[in-house]
Amino acid sequence: MSLSRQRVAVYPGTFDPITNGHIDLVARAAPLFERIVVGVAESPHKGPGFDLKDRIELAQICLADLPNVEVLGFDTLLADFVRRVGGGVLLRGLRAVSDFEYEFQMASMNRHLIPEVETLFLTPAEKYSFISSSLVREIARLGGDVSGFVHPRVDAALKKRWQRA
Ligand code: COA
C-alpha cells in the first residue's frame, strides 16, 4: 500500500445521530492521520431516525473544529467507499467487550473485501463507553435529558425531531 493511502483513515458508521463518543474517537484519531473521512452510511436496514442528509450535516457541525476531518455519505459497500476516497485504514471504536464479536466479524469480512486496508480500533474515553445512538434516540424520544451525551446542535435536532422543544 502506498504511504499516502496509509495516511487516510475512514471512520464508518450510521451516526444516527453522532454522539460525544463518536466525536471523542475522531478527535483521538485526528492527530494520527493526515486525513480522516467520516463515512455516514445510509443503513436502510437500521431504519434511521434521521435521514442521511441530516446525519451528515450534524456530523459536519460537530467535527467542524477538526480541519483534517471530512464527512461524506455513502450508500454502497463500505469497501467500495473506502477505495473511492483512497483510504488505507478503517477506523472503528471498541467501547466494551460486547462490541468485539461484531467488530471482529466486520473487520474479517472487510479484510476479505479490501485486503489492502487494515482495520484499526481505538477506545473512546471511559465516560462515553456506554453511549449508543439508539439509546440516545430512545431517551430523547421519551423526553429524557441527553445533553451530556451529544453536541448542543444534536440535542436541538433531537428535540425538534420529536417535538419536545
Ligand atoms: N461512541 C458512541 N457510540 C458508538 C461508538 C462510540 N465511539 N462507536 C459505536 N457506537 C455505537 C453507535 O452509536 C451504534 O449504536 P446504535 O446501533 O445503537 O445506533 C452502534 O455502536 C453501532 O455502531 P455504528 O458505528 O453505528 O456502526 P453500525 O453498526 O451502524 O454501522 C457500518 C456499521 C455502517 C460500518 C456497516 O453497516 C457498513 O459497513 N455498512 C455498509 C454496507 C457494507 O459494506 N456492509 C458490509 C460490511 S462488512
Image (cartoon, rainbow, N blue to C red):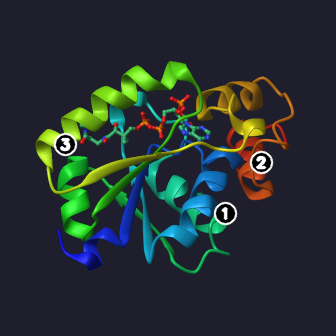
Residue type marked 1: Cys
- Does the residue tagged 1 have its C-beta within 8 Å of any atom of ligand 1? no
Quadrant observed for ligand 1 in the rendered image = top left
Sequence-first disc among 1 and 3: 1
- Spatial separation of the CA atoms under disc 1 and disc 2: 11 Å
Point out which mark residue 62 bears: 1
In this view of the protein, which residue sits in the foreground, 49 or 96?
Answer: 96
Residue type marked 3: Arg
**Disc number lying in front (1 or 2):** 1
Position of residue 74 measured from the top left corner of the image (x, y, whole percent): 31, 55
Residue type marked 2: Asp
**Disc number lying in front (1 or 3):** 3
- Spatial separation of the CA atoms under disc 1 and disc 3: 30 Å
Point out the image quarter for the N terminus.
bottom left
Name above or below for residue 94 compared with residue 21: above
Residue at (41, 29) in percent of width and height: 46
Q: Seen in the image, is 156 located left or right of residue 100?
A: right
Position of residue 44 measured from the top left corner of the image (x, y, whole percent): 35, 35
Q: Secondary structure at mark 3?
A: helix
Name above or below for residue 160 compared with residue 39: above
In this view of the protein, which residue sits in the foreground, 84 or 137?
Answer: 84
Point out which mark residue 155 bears: 2
Category of crowding for the residue at label 2, using alpha-carbon neighbours closer than 10 angstroms: few (below 14), some (14–19), many (at least 20): many
Q: Secondary structure at mark 1?
A: helix
> Badges 3 and 2: C-beta atoms under 8 Å apart?
no
Q: Seen in the image, is 74 located left or right of residue 139?
A: left
In this view of the protein, which residue sits in the foreground, 128 or 143?
Answer: 128
Sequence-first disc among 3 and 2: 3
Position of residue 101 measured from the top left corner of the image (x, y, whole percent): 39, 20
Task: Report which residue position mark 3 lands on.
Answer: 111
- Spatial separation of the CA atoms under disc 3 and disc 2: 36 Å
